[in-house]
Amino acid sequence: MLKEETNGGGGKGTGANTWARVCDTCRAAACTVYCRADSAYLCTACDARVHAANRVASRHERVWVCEACERAPAAFLCKADAASLCTACDADIHSANPLARRHHRVPILPISGSSHVPPATDPVDGFLGQDDVDETIDEEDEDEAASWLLINPVKNSNNQSNGFLFGGEVDEYLDLVENYDCPDQNQFNDQYSHHHHHHHHQQAQQQLFSVPQKSYGGDSVVPVQCGEAKAQLHHHQQQDFQLGLEFESSKAAYSYPGSISHSVSVSSMDVGVVPESSMSDISISHSRPPKGTIDLFSGPPLQMPAQLTPLDREARVLRYREKKKTRKFEKTIRYASRKAYAETRPRIKGRFAKRTDVEVEVDQMFSTTLMAETGYGVVPSF
DNA sequence: AAACAGTTTTGCACCACAAGACTAT
DNA sequence: GCATAGTCTTGTGGTGCAAAACTGT
């Protein structure tokens, strides 16, 4: 499936692959294997040389580098595609459609000894070289990830400290935007996340794909984790979850790049909303930040090691990329009552207009009638 | 290939006011 | 510390407009 579907673009694979991770040893050739013992990515030549140096080295377990992103150790071998894929790419590629989901994949086995047989698919001329398997992993992505995360990516080799000028904030950034959707939905988010339409005929289409699956009732917009994924949440991730939510609810909906402040125009019943009373429940152990601030970086600064191992860097890049892929751009309604009120308010050319005395009187009459009928005051709860 | 005009897309400010947050007493 | 009153701040959506992007000549 990969080869067929990735034909035609001609972007990455043609010519030199400038975005693949380079060999940690020679810094020239694209890496092809990852040595766990050395925590190093090596090209074929260096791998052969390094691991033929002595008996101990020759027993190092190595795995192929993911043929999709060429930046992470492969974790699965897809028999249908004859491709070695890292966890992220495997999830991405094989969640694309039902057919892909049926591909038989097996955990990848280490490369034995020094016998060096190239992967079944040539990374350059193979499926990656033909088009974007993963549209979100492009050169820009790599540059961005590298500029944030890599201590000395090749492109920035002159400025080795560049990657970690911001210390712990890097990691905070990585965790700011968390996705809580089922992986199967990602394909749709990916497809439409960068189209910020705010015209009605487009909204309908967008809603088809990007409105979160609602397994919740009432107003809550807080997306519910897929059961399995939720169960696998570690404590650290749960902290990220809280951070992300606070960030989104307090800021991101409006200032986030690509925010579609106009793209969702559906009734309160159609769009999820955060119940006002629940906002304080999101971060249980998080004291309220001072007015007008975002309490993201308060508290003790996170410790960031001055030097990260290649594995750590890889993990961070992967986390960053995963989160970037799964960012959500739907507008989050924090106050359903305000939304409902806004929808009923009179407008002049789209702008809110002052209500006339007559309208106010009608409203008062309505509420008075309602009180008389029900026998008690009605607190609007939309 | 460059320049230009016309068309389409995108991003954002604007508005009023209820509700919540905050401050003073 | 608690209660109350007053003030300030926030969030909400449809429209119009300007700028950017795109298309055709």
Image (cartoon, coloured by chain):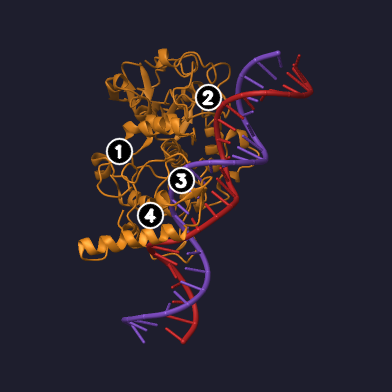
Chain colours: A orange, B red, C purple
- Looking at the rendered structure, the secondary structure element under dot 4 is loop
- Looking at the rendered structure, the secondary structure element under dot 3 is helix
On residue A174, the disc is 3
Label 2 sits on what residue type? Answer: Ala
Question: Residue A184: x and y, percent?
Answer: 32, 31
Circles 4, 1 touching at the beta carbon (< 8 Å): no
Q: Earlier in the sequence, mark 4 or mark 1?
A: 1
Which label sits in the foreground, 2 or 1? 1
The answer to whether any part of residue A33 appears in the image is yes
Circles 2, 3 touching at the beta carbon (< 8 Å): no
The residue positioned 42% from the left and 26% from the top of the image is A66
Q: Earlier in the sequence, mark 1 or mark 3?
A: 3
Label 3 sits on what residue type? Answer: Leu
Q: Alpha-carbon distance for marks 2 and 1?
A: 41 Å
Which label sits in the foreground, 2 or 3? 3
- Position of residue A292 relative to residue A100, above or below, is below
Q: Earlier in the sequence, mark 4 or mark 3?
A: 3
Q: Alpha-carbon distance for marks 2 and 4?
A: 51 Å
Question: Residue A191: x and y, percent?
Answer: 43, 29
- Position of residue C4 relative to residue A53, above or below, is below
* Residue pointed to by mark 1: A213
Kindly indicate whether the residues beneath marks 2 and 1 are on one polypeptide chain. Answer: yes
In the foreground, A349 or A264:
A349
Chain letter for mark 3, please: A
Q: Alpha-carbon distance for marks 1 and 3?
A: 24 Å
For label 3, the crowd category at 10 Å Cα-Cα, with few meaning under 14, some 14 to 19 and many 20 or more, is many
Label 4 sits on what residue type? Answer: Tyr
The residue positioned 41% from the left and 15% from the top of the image is A5
* Residue pointed to by mark 4: A335
* Residue pointed to by mark 2: A30
